[in-house]
Image: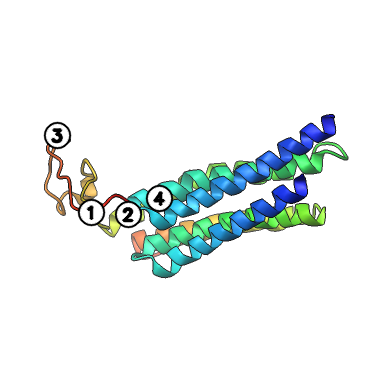
Amino acid sequence: MLDTMIEGVIAFMLIAGGAFAFIGSLGLTHLKDFYMRLHGPSKTTTLGVGCTLIGALIYFSREDGPVIQELLITIFAFITAPVSAHMLAKSALHHKLKPDPRTRGNPVELESERPRHTIEEAPQGDSPLP
Amino acid sequence: MIDMALWIALALFCAAIVLNFYRAVVGPSLPDRILAVDTMYMNSIALIVLFGIWLNSKDYFEAALLIAMLGFVSTIAVCKYLLRGDIIE
């Protein structure tokens, strides 16, 4: 009984991890500009890989005591993903990549590129929904 | 039950890597390509761990940990190069 429950938890973790990673990569492919595309991989894929690693941890801890190497990789991934996302955003702002015209607000680095406007009078743009 | 979940997860991660490869080839700008490769190594870590489960062997975690560390360092190095035009000043 307990064995079946643990197997169910492992299977759920593996499928949830795969689904999260796939949705993150789908966002990387389908969203409109770089600043939107940064969201999918840096949040969703990290969660998916973390779920898979925790499923592997439970799988290998079943027989002979707890195994913690997978936890090491999980913690490392969760620490480093925001750092690399921050560096990628900084380099994208440095290269002055064009944001989608419907994006509200202006970062300081793109000030010269776009007219300043408030949230109420933001242009609607003519790009179709992603 | 685990066997079937393993196959589903493997198929999802392979599809994710194919989508990342598409973005790495098409991606209009350089940060897009770096982001795609970054996501690709994250997905390959999960693929290696799933392969270890499939073979019922614990020997693949060192490889996954090495990929995680080298991938992070290389992403930061390329971003630094794009930002400053130099890696070690």
Q: Please report, as a chain letter, where disc 2 is located.
A: A
Q: Label 4: which residue?
A: A38
Q: Residue at x 73, y 53 (%)?
A: B61
Check disc 3: other Cα within 10 Å, few if <14, some if 14-19, many if 20+.
few
Q: Residue at x 32, y 54 (%)?
A: A32
Check disc 1: other Cα within 10 Å, few if <14, some if 14-19, many if 20+.
few
Q: Amino acid at mark 2?
A: Lys
Residue lying furthest top: A1
Q: Quadrant of residue A16?
A: top right
Residue B29 is situated, as x and y percent measured from the top left of the image, at 34, 64
Q: Can residue B12 be seen in this snapshot?
A: yes
Mark before the other along the chain sequence, 1 or 2: 2
Marks 1, 2: nearer the viewer = 1
Check disc 2: other Cα within 10 Å, few if <14, some if 14-19, many if 20+.
some
Residue A10 is situated, as x and y percent measured from the top left of the image, at 73, 40
Q: Please report, as a chain letter, where disc 1 is located.
A: A
Residue A42 is situated, as x and y percent measured from the top left of the image, at 47, 47
Mark sitting on residue B31: none
Q: Nearer the viewer, residue A35 or A6?
A: A6
Q: Label 2: which residue?
A: A32
Mark before the other along the chain sequence, 2 or 4: 2
Q: Residue at x 77, y 44 (%)?
A: B1
- C-alpha distance separating marks 4 and 1: 19 Å
Mark sitting on residue A127: 1
Q: Label 3: which residue?
A: A120
